[in-house]
Image: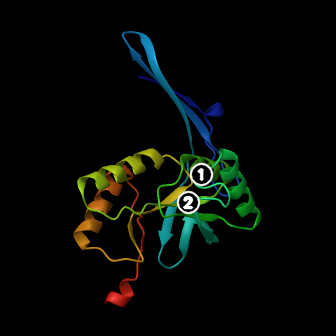
Amino acid sequence: IQQFLAIPENRVEPWDLNSPNLYGIRTELFVDGKKVDSHGDHFGFRTLEFNPQKGFFLNGKPVKFKGVCMHQDHAGVGVALPDAIHSFRITRLKQFGVNAYRCSHNPPAPEILDACDRQGMLVLNENRFFNSGEDYLRQLDEQVRRDRNHPSVWLWEPILNETWYPEDFAANVVRILHEEYPYPYCYAGCDAAARG
């Protein structure tokens, strides 16, 4: 396997909301000296920090969330949207002053994350499988592996959504997240207060 990383002059500029700097990588697979496959991708560098007293910091700078919860479908088109519509939506949201996008309630199309990467939009990456079976956990693992290099993804919501599930279910989900994405943050949106 050969990998080619495109970083101009070996200088790394962080990805953020106003300067969504991205870098490219190409991986090529060789068998017996012959290239049999290749894949290109982009990524960015950024730091995330939650402080209980001071709030959220992106690259050491405080950020206040101005977010929306968006379903992937679009009126008159459905769910299988052209890439341009994803990009258009993110552009319009940025123009409205939005800086955070919550996917609901399924793994987002990769093109949504690409648009958020390019335009500087934070993403709460969600799914809603709610099953502790082996197949569910495999799908979660695949989702995290697919999306973990997107600099726009800052938080995962694979546990709960206005619902309640046993602690062992949540523990399995958090374990998978931390194995595949070694950042300490995971989110659960639930009505737990009503359940004591």
According to the picture, the residue beneath numbered tag 2 turns out to be 123
Give the color scheme: rainbow, by chain, secondary structure or one colour.
Answer: rainbow
Left or right? Give the position of 32 relative to 166. Answer: right
For badge 2, the amino acid type reads Val
**Residue 123's spot in the image, x, y percent?**
55, 60
What residue sits 40% from the left and 78% below the top? 190
Q: Quadrant of the N terminus?
A: top left
Q: Quadrant of the C terminus?
A: bottom left
For badge 1, the amino acid type reads Ile
Looking at the image, residue 74 lies above or below residue 65: above
In the rendered image, is residue 7 in sight?
yes
Mark 2 or mark 1, earlier in chain: 1
Where disc 2 sits, the SS reads strand
**Residue 178's spot in the image, x, y percent?**
34, 56
Where disc 1 sits, the SS reads helix
Camera-near label (2 vs 1) is 1
Would you identify the image quadrant in which residue 133 lies? bottom left
Residue at far front of view: 76
What residue sits 29% from the left and 63% below the top? 131
Left or right? Give the position of 95 relative to 74. Answer: right
Would you identify the image quadrant in which residue 42 lies? top right
Left or right? Give the position of 122 relative to 160. Answer: right
| Cβ–Cβ under 8 Å for marks 2 and 1 | yes
In terms of depth relative to the viewer, which is nearer, 87 or 9? 87
Numbered mark located on residue 112 in the image: 1
**Residue 55's spot in the image, x, y percent?**
54, 74
Residue at far right of view: 95
Looking at the image, residue 114 lies above or below residue 130: above
Would you identify the image quadrant in which residue 102 lies? bottom right
**Residue 152's spot in the image, x, y percent?**
57, 54
